[in-house]
């Protein structure tokens, strides 16, 4: 350890108290590895401030001593955005102790909450006041507000409520020089100048530290209904989606796609059983409303789907418990995939109507570069967002498979990261596939806000190449 690093550690201990600065290997390890154990880092220390003032002082101290900062919330990300590098020189800033719900207004329908608050606990607080924070993720028991804002998290209800960005009304952030910017306004309408908070949403901690947010709440739907259908092909799934939009579009809250192979993995590893006869694809459809009559509307949709031979089989949940067990099939796919073996994640989106041709194109492209790869495809069909995951054979080259899938995405004018972000995992592919002018814009923003590269270096942005940015 250098004398400069030693001086920094002492300063951090003075700012937050010695107990909030972790350096012992066993204390640091849980923060240094992502949950899937795909990324392993080694920070100088983990620092756990308890308020925004301490965060600001930490940032200023790190700036002074030239130590870069990796912010972390619940450590549930899938792109390595919150994992430090292996240089043993970065400060891992855990926001977990900033976990207060500062206020909750059920009439104005807003909540002001600190970055380290767990998504599920904020949802539970809102539910007590008959309000809902409509971000639904399998990881919501650990994911934090700062994390979902910083990654612009998606989830299964984006179809109705939008990505996290659509819910953020105000932010408090700490800038690279330690300035605290208080933008915690509870306003639905605010056109007084540039909407700077948008820059920090989805920036994955590369521009500043989000310490608190004001989020929009919605009324809790009093009634909800869940159905699972099986269909023969993805074209049929899309036809069914269009029909669902026409019939129940204003109450539709999820329209998820799960391949028959993914369901088979869930049956194998999670011990769950498919509730209906198999097709090539399964659809999980949910609707919610404060008005009654949802069940009848969903039954009518299913009846029409059978009549028009769009669906092979289907079931509408008869109880809340049954709805939960239908959702369990979907929620266990990630875990089942991890248990099956080495997998390569692709979080892609294409225009909805391009999904069938993307699937055919990507399948051929993957087969071309790999002998033994198997596909595990599922996702948020209504959003055009597929988790096009590939279970690799022992001889398969992950980089070649990555490129094959992403090239198919580019051919369909899609995105190589729909909801998980770039983190460190997709930086190289971002650099390879993103237009030069867009990369230049991203670097100009970084340069303007964090010129010394203090925040989360190596994430989101690749270093500019000589003489240009692409
Ligand atoms: C989901 O939709 C998550 O369940 C995880 O975004 C996706 O495991 C994945 O690839
Ligand atoms: Zn997802």
Image (cartoon, helix red, strand yellow):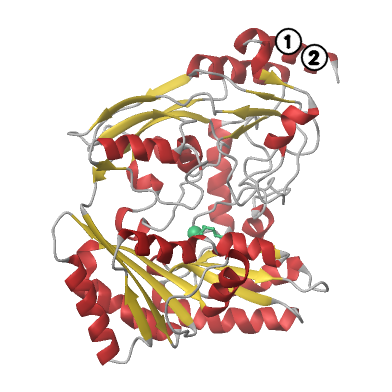
Image: 120 above or below 328 = above
Image point (67%, 38%), residue name:
457
The residue indicated by pointer 2 is: 6
Does residue 11 appear left or right of residue 283 in this picture? right
The one nearer the camera, 15 or 64, is: 15
Crowdedness near tag 1: few (<14), some (14–19) or many (≥20) residues, C-alpha within 10 Å = some
Image point (51%, 48%), residue name:
139
- Label 2 sits on a secondary structure element that is helix
Residue that extends furthest to the top in the rendered view of this protein: 14
Image point (79%, 70%), residue name:
397
Residue 362: x %, y % from top left? 60, 78
Image point (46%, 19%), residue name:
180
Does residue 202 appear left or right of residue 41 in this picture? left
- Label 1 sits on a secondary structure element that is helix
Residue 443: x %, y % from top left? 58, 43
Image: 203 above or below 257 = above
The residue indicated by pointer 1 is: 10
Q: Quadrant of residue 253?
A: bottom left
Residue 18: x %, y % from top left? 68, 11
Q: Quadrant of the C terminus?
A: bottom right
Image: 442 above or below 336 = above
The one nearer the camera, 270 or 454, is: 270
The one nearer the camera, 459 or 218, is: 218
| Residue 346 seen in render | no
Q: CA distance from mark 2 to mark 1?
A: 6 Å
Does residue 339 appear left or right of residue 421 in this picture? right
């Amino acid at each position: 350890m250098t004398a400069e690093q030693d001086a920094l550690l002492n300063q951090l201990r003075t700012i937050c108290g010695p107990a909030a600065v972790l350096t012992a290997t066993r204390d640091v390890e849980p923060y240094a590895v992502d949950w899937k154990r795909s990324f392993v880092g080694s920070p100088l220390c983990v620092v756990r401030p308890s308020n925004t003032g301490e965060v600001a002082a930490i940032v200023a101290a790190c700036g002074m001593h030239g130590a870069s900062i990796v912010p972390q919330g619940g450590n549930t990300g899938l792109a390595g955005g919150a994992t430090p590098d292996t240089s043993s020189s970065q400060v891992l800033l855990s926001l977990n102790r900033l976990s207060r719900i500062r206020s909750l207004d059920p009439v104005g329908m807003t909540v002001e909450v600190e970055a380290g608050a767990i998504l599920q606990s904020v949802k539970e607080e809102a539910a007590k006041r008959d309000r809902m924070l409509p971000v639904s993720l399998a990881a919501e028991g650990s994911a934090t507000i700062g994390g979902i804002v910083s990654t612009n998290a998606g989830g299964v209800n984006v179809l109705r409520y939008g990505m996290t960005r659509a819910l953020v009304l105000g932010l408090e952030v700490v800038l690279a020089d330690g300035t605290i910017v208080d933008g915690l306004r509870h306003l639905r309408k605010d056109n007084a100048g540039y909407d700077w908070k948008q820059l920090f949403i989805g920036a994955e901690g590369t521009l500043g530290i989000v310490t608190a947010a004001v989020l929009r709440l919605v009324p809790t739907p009093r009634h909800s209904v869940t159905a699972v259908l099986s269909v023969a092909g993805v074209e049929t799934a899309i036809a069914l989606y269009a029909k669902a939009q026409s019939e129940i579009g204003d109450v539709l809250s999820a329209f998820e796609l799960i391949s028959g192979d993914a369901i088979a993995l869930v049956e194998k590893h999670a011990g769950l059983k498919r509730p209906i006869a198999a097709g090539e694809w399964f659809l999980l459809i949910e609707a919610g409303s404060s008005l009654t009559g949802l069940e009848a509307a969903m039954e009518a949709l299913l009846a029409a789907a059978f009549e028009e031979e769009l669906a092979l089989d289907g079931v509408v949940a008869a109880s809340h418990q049954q709805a939960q067990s239908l959702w369990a099939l979907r929620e266990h796919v990630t875990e089942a995939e991890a248990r099956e073996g080495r997998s390569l994640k692709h979080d892609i989106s294409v225009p909805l109507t391009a999904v069938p041709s993307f699937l055919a194109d990507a399948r051929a492209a993957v087969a071309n570069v790999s002998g033994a790869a198997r596909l595990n495809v599922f996702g948020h069909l209504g959003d055009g967002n597929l988790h096009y995951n590939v279970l690799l054979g022992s001889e398969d080259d992950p980089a070649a498979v990555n490129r094959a899938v992403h090239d198919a995405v580019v051919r369909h004018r899609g995105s190589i990261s729909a909801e998980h972000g770039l983190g460190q995992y997709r930086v190289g592919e971002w650099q390879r596939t993103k237009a030069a002018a867009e990369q230049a814009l991203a670097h100009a923003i970084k340069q303007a806000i964090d010129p010394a590269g203090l925040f989360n270096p190596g994430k989101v942005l690749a270093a500019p190449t000589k003489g240009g940015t692409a």
